[in-house]
Amino acid sequence: MIDYDENDLINDDYVNATTDGDDPKYTGIRDRERVNKKELYEIVWFCNAFVKNYKVPKTKESYQKVEKLIRLPEASNIVMRKDLNDFVAKNWNKDLV
């Protein structure tokens, strides 16, 4: 599977740097457990990782579907990576996006 990048995302309102309160030098457990859905690199990484690790088609459309699902209002308060993966997996076959 190829890795997709920011050019393959649907939305273009992500910040291409760390957001306020996020230390770019910190890469500890807290940073690995959480997803900042405003930061471009985190969205790209999360969408690619989901498509690679779950039984979904390994396509650009799947990559974009992950992006759409994590932007749903129902996912707005989900920040933990595991919970966000669970949300996307649970809702993959629903007609939400």
Image: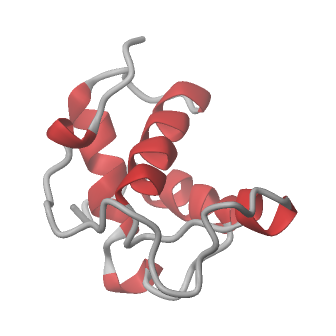
Location of the N terminus by quadrant is top left
- Name the residue: 58% across, 64% down: 84
- Name the residue: 57% across, 79% down: 78
- Name the residue: 39% across, 45% down: 44
**Residue furthest out toward the right:** 29
Q: Specify the quadrant of the image occupied by residue 7.
A: top left
Q: Specify the quadrant of the image occupied by residue 67.
A: bottom left
Where residue 24 appears, x then y in whole percent? 60, 63
Vertical order, 34 against 10 (above or below): below
Left or right: where 74 falls relative to 81: left
Q: Specify the quadrant of the image occupied by residue 35.
A: bottom right
Left or right: where 53 falls relative to 6: right
- As rendered, which of 74 and 34 lies closer to the eye? 34
- As rendered, which of 1 and 25 lies closer to the eye? 25
- As rendered, which of 44 and 70 lies closer to the eye? 44
Where residue 92 appears, x then y in whole percent? 41, 51
Where residue 66 appears, x then y in whole percent? 36, 50
- As rendered, which of 93 and 66 lies closer to the eye? 66
**Residue furthest out toward the top:** 1
Location of the C terminus by quadrant is bottom left
